[in-house]
């Protein structure tokens, strides 16, 4: 089983990217599970369409030990198993600790044994890498971390902080840095800046996603680009990215 965590500055297009990658991998016959690690519980919205999905923490609060896996996991039309970790009510509790509790609940209830995913994708909130937000990259969870960024200064700064955290966690047996993904915003010297960032951490830019109205159009339809515009150039970009990610993870797992 391959486990991957995606990090990046809030608003960088991470959930959209992860959902499209998940849809591509599922179309290849792989059993894919996407776990949203964000209190907003909106990571899998493009996969679920109109379907509502209660978060793991909400179900645990409401039903306690009576909460069952079938209420926590939804199989999207594209075949991806969707899970939302959720978080505490606004202003109450620690969102990071919520991620820890949600992932531990999934493990205790035997989610991996029941659904037997080939690949798990963790979509992690923003650029926070402390406390519970580092949970998906800890031993026993993700094997590789991919960082999304654009050429905007704040995105570059966030990406560098995440990469530095991964570097500092090396001695603890945490996940390795698989590479950077450039989600274009068409700013000056964007490619050069992101390439230099990757080189600073002895890594590489493993994928480039061009700015495209098809992404926005698909989101308005509550679909992934893969489902809404399967023959488009943008769908091809997501397919290429998914294949590259899969190749990196398989090579590292040898």
Image (cartoon, rainbow, N blue to C red):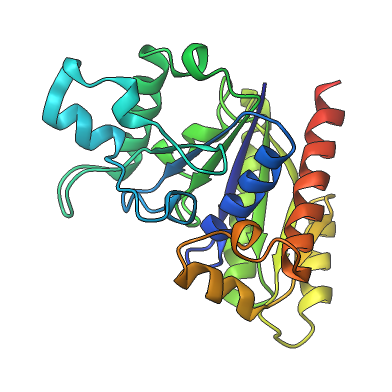
State left or right for residue 158 relative to residue 175. left
Residue at image location 83% in from the left, 50% down from the top: 203
Estimate the x, y position of residue 10 in percent, counting from the top left: 47, 64
Does residue 167 appear in the picture of this structure?
A: no
Does residue 217 lie above or below 59 as drawn?
Answer: below
Q: Which of 214/242 is in front? A: 214
State left or right for residue 94 relative to residue 112. left
Does residue 71 lie above or below 48 as drawn?
Answer: above
Q: Which of 75/95 is in front? A: 75
Tell which residue pokes out farthest to the bottom in this image. Answer: 188
Q: Which of 61/127 is in front? A: 61
Estimate the x, y position of residue 93 in percent, counting from the top left: 19, 42
Residue at image location 73% in from the left, 68% down from the top: 234
**Number of residue marks:** 0
Q: Quadrant of the C terminus?
A: top right
Does residue 119 appear in the picture of this structure?
A: yes
Estimate the x, y position of residue 133 in percent, counting from the top left: 44, 41
Q: Quadrant of the N terminus?
A: top right
State left or right for residue 55 relative to residue 201. left
Residue at image location 66% in from the left, 24% down from the top: 118
Estimate the x, y position of residue 220 in percent, counting from the top left: 46, 72
Residue at image location 84% in from the left, 38% down from the top: 247
């Amino acid at each position: 089983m391959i486990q991957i965590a995606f990090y990046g500055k809030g608003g960088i297009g991470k959930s959209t990217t992860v959902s499209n990658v998940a849809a591509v991998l599922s179309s290849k016959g792989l059993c894919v599970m996407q776990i949203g690690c964000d209190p907003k519980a909106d990571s899998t919205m493009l996969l679920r369409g109109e379907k509502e999905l209660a978060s793991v923490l909400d179900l645990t609060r409401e039903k306690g030990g009576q909460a069952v896996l079938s209420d926590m996991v939804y199989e999207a039309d594209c075949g991806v198993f969707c899970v939302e970790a959720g978080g505490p009510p606004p202003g109450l509790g620690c969102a990071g600790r919520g991620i820890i509790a949600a992932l531990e609940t999934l493990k205790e209830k035997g989610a991996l044994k029941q659904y037997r995913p080939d690949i798990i994708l963790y979509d992690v909130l923003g650029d926070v890498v402390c406390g519970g937000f580092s949970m998906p990259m800890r031993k026993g969870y993700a094997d590789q971390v991919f960082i999304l960024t654009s050429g905007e200064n704040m995105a570059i700064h966030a990406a560098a902080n995440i990469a530095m955290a991964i570097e500092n966690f090396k001695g603890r047996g945490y996940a390795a840095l698989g590479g950077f993904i450039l989600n274009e915003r068409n700013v000056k010297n964007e490619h050069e800046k992101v390439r230099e960032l990757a080189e600073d951490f002895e890594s590489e830019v493993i994928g480039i996603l061009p700015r495209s109205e098809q992404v926005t159009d698909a989101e308005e339809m509550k679909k992934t680009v893969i489902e809404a515009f399967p023959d488009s150039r943008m769908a091809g970009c997501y397919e290429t990215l998914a294949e590259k990610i899969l190749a990196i993870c398989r090579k590292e797992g040898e």
